[in-house]
Amino acid sequence: MSKLENKIEARHRNLFDVLNEQKYTVDYFQREYSWGEKHIEELVTDLTSAFLNEYAPGDKRKEVENYNNYYLGPFVVSSKDGKRSIIDGQQRLTSLTLFLIYLNNLQKELGESQKIEPLIFSEKYDEKSFNITVEERIPCLEALFNYGSYSPAETDDESTANMAERYQDIVEAFPEELKNDAFPFFIDWLKYNVIMVEIIAYSDENAYTIFETMNDRGLNLTPSEMLKGFILSRFDHADKRQKANDLWKKAMMELKAFEKDEDQRFFQSWLRAQYADTIRPGKAGSKNEDFEKIGTRFHSWVRDNLNKVGLDPDSGTSFEQFIQHEFQFFLKAYTHILKAEKVLNARLEHVYYIHRWGIAPTLSFPLMLAPLNVDDSDDMVVAKINTVARYIETFVVRRSVNFRKFSASSIRYTMYSLVKDIRGKSLDDLKQVLSKKLVEMQESFEGVDEFRLHGQNYRFVKFLLSRMTAWVEQQAGMSTSFATYYQPEKGKPFEVEHIWADKFSRHQDEFEQEHEFNSYRNRLGDLVLLPRGTNQSYGDLPYEQKHPHYIKENLLVKSLCPLAYQNNPNFTRLQSELNLPFKPHEAFKKQDVDTRQHLYRAICERIWHHDLNS
């Protein structure tokens, strides 16, 4: 190797230096962008909370220079022939690019003029190119930059579709309290006070060695490890300390089998659920309180709040009991939730649902753990968790059909307050409290009457139709489930399809303007779930010609056909016993869309009613 190839550099750089008019490619083995909602939500929450802990209304912009820095970790690049390839850190840098695109779009709405664009793309010879270049992702990035949304095509890879979803998560996670005078301060802070360590290798061999060392042999202590060190240091007996250490290590391995950082999310959720009392008010300049501090430095919070946690600094026994009882109990409950998110389980079905459409995990997990008591039986733990998850699902569905958002930033104060309201409650009291909360909600299922598909809510519409379709079939004694339609393990995936073909000319007797037709065509009453490719085969036919094909499909689609009402006692019993306004449709006009919409509302009211005792 030459001297240059042997060279390795590491330097402290702010985000502006890292991204401003810089060019990176992504190494082939780092190609997949796999961050989920909770990763993005954590990034946005951590960054905005760190800023808000420094900012005070009335500050001058120059004072941002003296705000505390935020360390975002290292990234590794290989530099060859003037080109730089990201070896480690692609997830964070891609997520930051999505975040910067959102901030750039937001500042247009707010009338700001911060120079963010050079951190996203650079321009040469009148041609723009994104600073982090992966060819197949360019259409997605361009659409997000220009329009704030992207609808993935069938040819898109999983990473591109994931990027589009994570952008929407950023929209939901960004706090309202920064959409004011604090916004330009936040941009300054993000550009110049968020710090990364850039490690540059000038040969692929050295770059991969650094990558392996950082991922396999990293020695930095995590907050979980620091908490363990503090707690175990208070044990009175070495043998008990060793047993507790073995127990802790086994637990951390179990959690990390789900996700690399799941151990930290466990402690954040558990401590918030059971011990946090104070919350930062939702206004710029407020200081972080229990809920925020646990989210950023829970190991320090425990050390500073021993009384709240029930730990006696002068009694090693209290620390031993904490590990033997509280720790093990809440670990088991937490893993119940993690497993229920992945596989549909009848006893915890609502956990599965809210993992697909629910509030941010930083809110939902503390809520689900809050009512638990260490002497609860396993059955009681499951019942309480599922009850809270059912409340969360009903809450988000009601908000969604009324076109109301439920971003973490907009509901965090409400939900963290609810954590305290339901903490340690019996199952009966829990149901009473949460049922009352649903009764008090402003949003009702009257919103379904006007609900429609638009560019930003396809995922929710698919969720809604999947839940309704599975519920109707289950009430009729069939064995299908939500997973059958939302995320089937085999067979063709299901897609949201229109009953009306996209043919304005066929509906000019009822609509004078094409935009009126298009709006009505997107109403929920005109939508069904069909296997991919099915609707394409007869989708352009007039309704009268294609609706006989619907008899071969799921029961909610079949219900359009007169034949579904003949010799089908389970279906007709469902119709009469639940008083649901099913009816066949020989034709499908504007009034039929309204009738169908009324049916969907009735089904929603049955599935997501406010009485959690039934």
Image (spheres, rainbow, N blue to C red):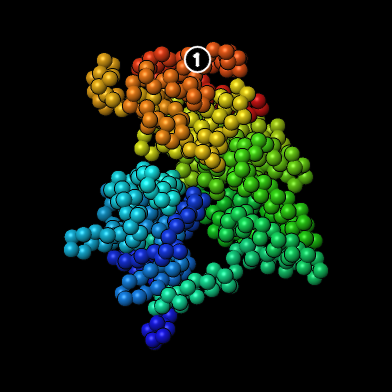
Image position of 593 with respect to 43: above or below: above
Q: Position of residue 345 (x, y in %)?
A: 65, 39
Q: Could you tell me which secondary element the residue under label 1 belongs to?
A: helix
Could you tell me which residue is drawn at 80 percent across and 61 percent down? 317
- Which of the 4 quarters of the picture holds residue 303? bottom right
Q: If the image is split into quadrants, where does the N terminus sit?
A: bottom left
Question: Would you say 435 lies left or right of 39 here?
Answer: right
Image position of 64 with respect to 579: above or below: below
Could you tell me which residue is drawn at 53 percent across and 31 percent down? 467
Is any atom of residue 134 visible in this view?
yes
Residue assigned mark 1: 563
Could you tell me which residue is drawn at 37 percent across and 32 percent down? 536
Is any atom of residue 70 visible in this view?
no
Q: Amino acid at mark 1?
A: Leu
- Which of the 4 quarters of the picture holds residue 527? top left
Q: Position of residue 455 (x, y in %)?
A: 36, 37
For the residue pair 10 and 234, the one nearer the viewer reads as 10
For the residue pair 433 and 393, the one nearer the viewer reads as 393
Q: Position of residue 184 (x, y in %)?
A: 33, 56
Question: Would you say 257 lies left or right of 509 here?
Answer: right
